[in-house]
């Protein structure tokens, strides 16, 4: 027996799946309102040496937090505060182009 689906049948199945998915999301939000503000997250994997891992684990242990929380905090700090080199480069560009910016204003 051979089963084949036409494009319209596939589209219909996709619509049904999307409707079901949307209903499921609605039900989850109604029953678990506390997760409505949760952001989507991504994961990354990096290779580090055993020595680096041990140092990070020691830092986390000394801080009384998990390794993951230590890394998240450091990444947030890094992204929230521009580095000195970035600030210096930005100042250089602003000073170098000050006359141009003045004319464009």
Image (tube, grey):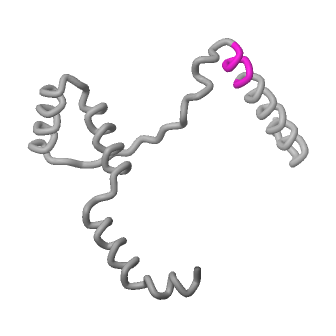
Task: Please tell me how many numbered marks the rendered image carries.
Answer: 0
Give the quadrant of the C terminus.
bottom right
Residue 5: name its quadrant.
top right
Give the quadrant of the N terminus.
top right
User: Which residue is at the front of the view, 57 or 75?
Assistant: 75
User: Which residue is at the front of the view, 11 or 25?
Assistant: 25
Please name the residue shown 82% across and 36% down the image: 13
Residue 58's spot in the image, x, y percent? 11, 32
Residue 27 lies in the magenta-colored region: yes
Please name the residue shown 71% across and 15% down the image: 30
Q: Going by the image, does 100 lie left or right of 72?
A: right
Residue 65's spot in the image, x, y percent? 23, 25
Residue 81's spot in the image, x, y percent? 33, 52
Residue 53: name its quadrant.
top left
Q: Which residues are magenta?
A: 25-30
Q: Is residue 75 above or below residue 38?
A: below
Q: Is residue 36 above or below residue 6?
A: above
Q: Going by the image, does 18 lie left or right of 37?
A: right
User: Which residue is at the front of the view, 70 or 3?
Assistant: 70
Q: Residue furthest right?
A: 8
Residue 90 lies in the magenta-colored region: no
User: Which residue is at the front of the view, 68 or 3?
Assistant: 68
Q: What secondary structure characterizes most of the magenta part?
A: helix
Q: Residue furthest top?
A: 31
Please name the residue shown 13% across and 44% down the image: 52
Q: Is residue 16 above or below residue 101?
A: above
Residue 3's spot in the image, x, y percent? 82, 38
Q: Is residue 76 above or below residue 65?
A: below
Please name the residue shown 14% across and 34% down the image: 59
Q: Going by the image, does 94 lie left or right of 39?
A: left
């Amino acid at each position: 027996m051979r089963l084949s689906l036409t494009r319209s049948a596939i589209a219909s199945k996709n619509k049904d799946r999307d409707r079901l998915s949307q209903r499921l999301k609605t039900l989850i939000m109604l029953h678990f309102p506390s997760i409505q503000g949760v952001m989507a997250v991504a994961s990354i994997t990096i290779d580090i040496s055993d020595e680096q891992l041990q140092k990070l684990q020691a830092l986390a242990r000394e801080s009384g937090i998990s390794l993951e929380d230590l890394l998240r905090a450091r990444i947030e700090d890094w992204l929230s505060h521009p580095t000195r080199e970035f600030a210096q480069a930005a100042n250089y560009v602003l000073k170098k182009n000050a006359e141009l910016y003045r004319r464009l204003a």
